[in-house]
Structure formats: C-alpha cells, structure tokens
Amino acid sequence: MPPTSQTLTAERILEATEEVLRRHGPAKATVVDVARALGVSHGSVYRHFRTKAALREAVTKRWLDRTSERLARIVTAGGSPEERLRAWLAALFEAKRHKAGDDPELFATYTVLTDENGTVVGEHIADLTGQLTRIIEAGTGSGAFMAPDPAAAARAVFHATGRFHDPGYAREWQRPGVQEEFEAVVDLLLRGLTSP
Amino acid sequence: MPPTSQTLTAERILEATEEVLRRHGPAKATVVDVARALGVSHGSVYRHFRTKAALREAVTKRWLDRTSERLARIVTAGGSPEERLRAWLAALFEAKRHKAGDDPELFATYTVLTDENGTVVGEHIADLTGQLTRIIEAGTGSGAFMAPDPAAAARAVFHATGRFHDPGYAREWQRPGVQEEFEAVVDLLLRGLTSP
C-alpha cells in the first residue's frame, strides 16, 4: 500500500520525521526531507507543520512526551508516596538510560534537538517537576513527608538527581556501580523529605 | 630582568603554561610553546616535563588543586559539622562559578584539558569526596549526622550537588535563582543526613 493512500496525519509525519532523523542525523529533518520519505508533496506536510522549526519542535516534544506520559501513570498509581517517589525517579532514570543505551545515535540526535528547542524542554521539565510535586503533596497530606513548599521540594529532588536523568551524564549510565550511586542519592533525599 | 636569569622551576613552567593556554587556547601548550614563552630552550622544560602529555596533566592538576586546597581549610576549620558541610559546598560552588564566570575562555580550555586527563580528575574527585567524608565523620562522631557509611554518604552528597559544581552546568550558574536552587538542594541533603 503506497503511503499516499493513508490519511496524512501529524502523527504519521512525526513518525516519518523520527525515521529521517534516525537514518540521516540531526542536520536532516526539514519539511522537504520528510515529504520525500513519505512520498507526498511538501505542500501536504506544510499543511501540518508550517516551518522546519515547527516540525523539529514537534518531534522533540513527542520524544520527551513519551517519557512524561509513562511517568504520569506512576503519579496516580497505588502505593505510598515514598514508594511512588522511588518508583518515579527509578522510571525516569530507566527511561533515559534506555533511550541513551538502546540507540545512541538517535539519542545524540535528540540531544542536538533539545539544545535548539529550549521552550519545549522547559515545558517538559515543568511537567516532570509538576508530577513530582503531586507525589510530594500526597506525602505531606498523609504525614509521610515534611515539605512546607512541595513545589520547591520537587525542584530540589529533580536537581539533586540530575546525574541520573540529564543527557550530559549519559556516558556515566553504563558504568558499573551507577545503580548503587543512584540509590544512595535517592535514599538520602527520601530521608530529607521524611525528616521532622 | 630576562626570564632566564631566574631559576626555572616546575612552578614557573606551569605558570607560563597557563598563560600560553589563556592566550592561545587548548590546542597550544606543548613543551615547545611554553619554552618559547619563557625564552628558554625546550631542553630546559623537558628536564621538568618529559612529554606534552605530562605538562598538560600537571597544569590541569595545578588548576584543580587550587580549588581543593581552599576547600581543605574548611574541613579543619571551626564550626559544627553542619556549618562546615554547608560552607564547604558553598565554597565549591563559588570556586567553580568564579572560574567559569571570571574567565570563560580559560574555563573552556580547562574543560578540554580535564576531558583528556581522566586520571587527574578522578584523583581530584576522590580528594574532594575524601574531604566531605571527614566532615560527615565528624558529624556522625558528634551525633549531628546519621550516616552508617560516611564515605558513601559523601559520594551521594557530591553526586546530588553536581548541578552546582560540574562544568557541564556552567551555563546555569549565572542564571537568576540558581543560588536559591542550590540552597534548596543543600537544605534537603542536610535534613537527610540529620534524619534519625
């Protein structure tokens, strides 16, 4: 079935964009490159994404959203706030480590894209620290955590665990001992949050 | 007084090496470049540093040592272990922020040098976490801190504050609000260490 027989949705364009990026690296992924990969006119792609910048921003957001959507499920899952906080931080580390380890070239490509899309990254970080805030609020509500300002505590936890989610540390994530380092930091932060 | 009339010490060579790096960037600082800057024969420099790699490693170590020597004074200073831990982390952040902000080009040059001198950097980090261990041990001794393994706790504190000393974050250090972010992380870690 030729691609043109399917409806050209934004999602199909973004899938094709990721494939173009995977094959040709971060310099590619213009509207024209993606139209060619889909076998459609570039006018069809322009109806969804009016500029190369808009297309690159949308594919970056889609990539980041895959992580935040998975983490959001932990916020509303069962378990104590402490268990959910541990599970959330472990899932964030795991998601980033997998992205970096399974397909290092695509990860490097997305690192270039995140560097050029500061607004999308800022929104992603705000989304993640918002999720952390909700877990910490649940803990202050139940008496498990002491945090007069849950949003500030969430940002502190996010910053203190940067070594385990910031792409700049990707080289460290395959080293032996990194899991123990992660757990030592999380233990210390959890003790800080539960401290009277 | 021409430079050759002074005794050519390793320290004078390293000072000249830093000056060569400051003026010409990380690609420079070979034994020959430095001999020329000092107005001496390269044979004289080779008596102190036998290879370009040895010279570059020594100048990197000297740069890192300037930070660790200043911090070492806090380890043995007066004040409670909590005060010393706060002062030590603040001094580390301050030292790195100054290095990055006062002379960004030299900082970028040293970032290249630290990337190529992994052993020296490893020793520097071991030195710093050793200093932190001594402060935490003083705190467990006085009952101020609860840390069954002070060396592991020191590494966790060092990792959790990476955002405020790792050169990869240098861009963040001039942003408004970074001091509050730093203090929020330190407060949380201190609560973790004092938690029963």
Image (spheres, coloured by chain):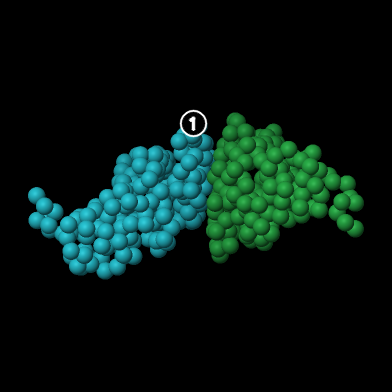
Chain colours: A green, B cyan
Q: Is residue A21 left or right of residue A6?
A: left
Q: Nearer the viewer, residue A64 or B181?
A: A64
Residue shown at the point (28%, 52%) measured from the top left: B20
Q: Is residue A117 above or below residue A165?
A: above
Q: Amino acid at mark 1?
A: Pro
Residue shown at the point (48%, 54%) measured from the top left: B155
Residue marked by disc 1:
B176
Q: Is residue A187 left or right of residue B165?
A: right
Neighbourhood count class around disc 1 (C-alpha, 10 Å): few under 14, some 14–19, many 20 upward:
few
Label 1, secondary structure: give it: loop
* Residue B162: % across, % down: 49, 47
Q: Quadrant of the C terminus of chain A?
A: top right
Q: Is residue A166 left or right of residue B162?
A: right
The chain that hosts pointer 1 is B
Is residue B34 in view from this perspective?
A: yes
Q: Is residue B163 above or below residue A180?
A: above
Q: Quadrant of the N terminus of chain A?
A: bottom right
Residue shown at the point (29%, 68%) measured from the top left: B51
* Residue A117: % across, % down: 62, 41
Is residue A84 in view from this perspective?
A: no
* Residue B154: % across, % down: 46, 52
Q: Nearer the viewer, residue A173 or B51?
A: B51
Q: Nearer the viewer, residue B24 or B74?
A: B24
